[in-house]
Amino acid sequence: MSCLTVSIVNYKTAQLVVECIDSLKRFAPQLARLDIVVVDNASQDGSLSVIAQAHPDVRLIDAGANLGFAGGNNLALRECRSDYVLLLNSDALVEAGTLDGLLQVLQQNSGVGAVSPRVVNADDGADQDYPSSFPSLPEMFRRAWRGPQYPAAGRTEPVLLERLHGACMLLRGELLSSVGLLDDGFFMYDEDVDWCVRARSKGWQLWLLPQLRVLHHGGKSSGRAPSGRRAPLELSSTALRMRYELRRSRYRLYRKHRSVAELLLLKGLTDLAMLLASLRLLLRCIRAQQRPAALALLRANLQVMALNPFVKVDERGA
C-alpha cells in the first residue's frame, strides 16, 4: 500500500495539533497508510509532551529553534521517501473523504503534481480567502481593489491554478527530488508560492478540488487575523513580527522570480503604503487608549520601510 506522510509544524498550538491529528485518524485514508510527523519550532511551552501524551504513535521532531514554516517542514521532509506528502497547518481539520479524495485525483491524473481542497472557516464553514495567482503587482492591485478571492465558489470540477493554499497541500513524493524542498529562506509566507512556481516550471499542474474541504482556524501560530479578515489594532508581538516577515518574504519571492525593475517598484509601493498607514497611526496616538498599540504598529511599519529588498537574509531568529 502507498504511504502518505503528513507534515505538521507546531508553534505554541499543541491543543490544535492534537485536534488536527484526531481528525486525521478519524478520517484516515483507505488508499494509503498514514504516517504523521510533527515538528515543534521551539514552542517552549510543553507542546511536545502534550502531543506525545495524546498521540504516542506520532513521530515528533524537536527543531531546537524556530525555523519557520518552511524550515520546520523541511526537517520532516528531507529524508521522506513516501509516495505522497501532505503539508497541513496545525490549525486545520480534515473531513470525511478529504484525504482519499485528494489521493484519488493524484493517482488518476499523472500530470498533476499537487492538489488542495477548498479551505473554509472552522467555525462557520464559509470559504476563506484563497489567493490563486502569483502575487504580481497587477494581481496585488486587483486584490486590493476587489478583496478576497474564492476560486472554489460555485465550482465542483477541479480548477487549474497558479498556486495552491499552503494550509493543506498534497503533493507527489517524487516532487521532493525533482522540484526540491520548500525554500527555508522564507521564514513564513510565500514559501508555498515559491514552491508552486518551481513545480509549474517543471511542467506539473496544480489543481484545487472544490468538492473536498479542510476546516481552517487561521492565524493561530502567526497571531495575525486569517487572510481576508481585518485584524484589530491590538496586535501581539508575534503578529507584529509577521507583518515584517510577510514583506521580507515577498521581496525574496520577487528576487527569485521577477525582474529587478518589478522588485524596485514593489519596494517603492510597499514603502508608500507603510508611510500612509503610519500617518494614520500618528493620528490614533492622540487617543491615550490607542496610543500603545498605534506606536507598536508604527515601529513595525518603520522596520518594514528599512528593509533592503536586495539583501538575502537567511538567518532567522526564534
Image (spheres, rainbow, N blue to C red):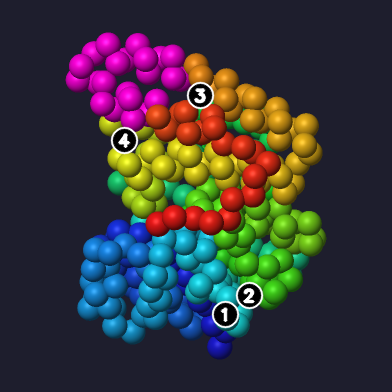
Report, in whole angstroms, how far the alpha carbon at label 4 lies from the one at label 3: 16 Å
Which element is circle 3 on?
Answer: helix
User: Which corner quadrant holds the N terminus?
Assistant: bottom right
Q: Say few, some or many: other residues with alpha carbon within 10 Å of mark 3 (under 14 / 14 to 19 / 20 or more).
A: some
Task: Work out whether mark 4 precedes mark 3 in sequence or the reverse, and give the earlier one.
Answer: 4
* Amino acid found under the numbered disc labelled 2: Gly
Residue at 45 percent across and 38 percent down: it is 243
At x 42%, y 47%, the residue is: 120
Residue bounds of the magenta highlight:
277-298
Which label sits on residue 173?
Answer: 2
Q: Position of residue 302 (x, y in %)?
A: 47, 28
Specify the quadrant of the image occupied by residue 103.
bottom right
Q: Which residue is mark 3?
A: 274
What amino acid type should be assigned to the residue bearing mark 3? Met
- Separation of residues labelled 4 and 2 (CA atoms): 38 Å
Residue extending farthest bottom:
1
Q: Secondary structure at mark 1?
A: loop
Q: Main secondary structure of the magenta part?
A: helix
Q: Is residue 257 left or right of residue 2?
A: right
Residue 241 image offset from top left, x and y in percent: 41, 42
In front: label 1 or label 3 = 3
- Mark 4, residue position: 235
Q: Quadrant of residue 82?
A: bottom right
